[in-house]
Amino acid sequence: MNLLVLGPGADPPISTDRGVSMIPTADRQAHAPDRSLLLMEQDALVARCSCWSTGTPILDERPAGVIGHYAAADAASGQALLDHACALLSSHGAATAVGPMDGSTWRRYRFVIERGNEPPFFLEPDNPDGWPSHWTTAGFTPVASYTSALNADLAVEDPRTAAALDRLRESGIAIRTFDPSRTTEELQRIFALSLAAFRRNFLYTPIGEEEFLAQYQAVLPHVSSETVLLAERGDRLVGFMFALPDLFERRRGGSVETIILKTIAVDPSVGGIGLGGVLMDLVQRKARALGFRRAIHALIHESNVSGRISARSAQTMRRYALFAKPL
């Protein structure tokens, strides 16, 4: 096997007849890895990944090396590639390698490790079932766990919402729907709150406003403003819930009956008064009024408060893990 190490610039022509595609050029440009690695066998691509060693998240009080853009044709190729990636990151001073993560938790990261019976949903990271074992064979172990949960009956409402809404009103907090006539301004406020609300999240690094806006603007044409709720205290945004339809249901030939609760954020200054639970319950009620029957609570870190809120109405349907290895 031969290893090609790519820096910034154009990708060389590569045969992909072993089932491993090249890293999309747009992703390499937007995600700016320090290096991308291509493992070749008889001129065919058999495994690939990218590595980040600058501007990376903190783990155990030191910057971690990050491995993402991962794909491999088989376990032996995957393990060989990961060994090369770890050696590269170690040579650049990383004490730990983490992945799969495309440079940041704002992008694609985690592996599905327990698939369950539900099919993949829109914007969910997915992977062949064998890929996690490539990483464990290479010496990685799970460092964080996540779940997605299914609320199969949107007719059930949270009885705590009425009292919580009274508390929010007494605190000067009002909830409204997203205003599509002010899309850029609304998204800029959501961006600012996201930075504040998520800064203590595991492996957090900030994201640029331009990339954040591009991510949300790409899906907004499919989103009803009724399922994006903003909580404000005066002119200050203190919470939001962003939900969108599971477009994969239509791709599979059915009707779209499932809403995906993608992101919930609450300003730390108003934590503990029930805002998160209210936002989740109200979005599910609005989704039911729009004709949705089910809701997926997507990609929740198992230690997050949102997981406890989700458990009020939904049951775990899928599990994911992020992996790490000391170098």
Image (spheres, rainbow, N blue to C red):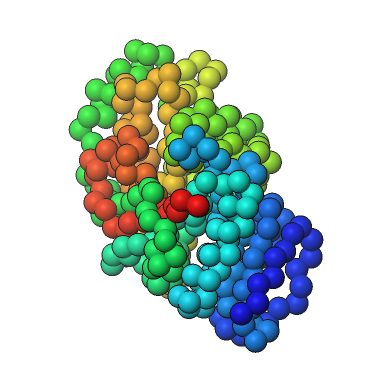
- The image position of residue 326, as x and y in percent, is 46, 51
Query: Going by the picture, which residue comes out furthest to the right?
Result: 9
Q: Is residue 277 left or right of residue 249?
A: left
Q: Is residue 68 left or right of residue 278?
A: right
Q: Is residue 326 left or right of residue 23?
A: left
Closest to the observer: 141 or 24? 141
- The image position of residue 289, as x and y in percent, is 35, 46
The quarter in which the N terminus is drawn is: bottom right
Q: Is residue 113 in view from this perspective?
A: yes
- The image position of residue 294, as x and y in percent, is 31, 54
All told, the count of numbered labels is 0
Closest to the observer: 252 or 293? 252
- The image position of residue 24, as x and y in percent, is 66, 65
Q: Who's the residue at 24% across and 51% down the image?
A: 315
Q: Who's the residue at 65% across and 38% down the image?
A: 208
Q: Who's the residue at 33% across and 65% down the image?
A: 115
Q: Is residue 122 in view from this perspective?
A: no
Residue 174, placed above or below residue 292: above
Residue 280, placed above or below residue 173: below
Residue 54, placed above or below residue 182: below
Q: Who's the residue at 28% across and 24% down the image?
A: 164
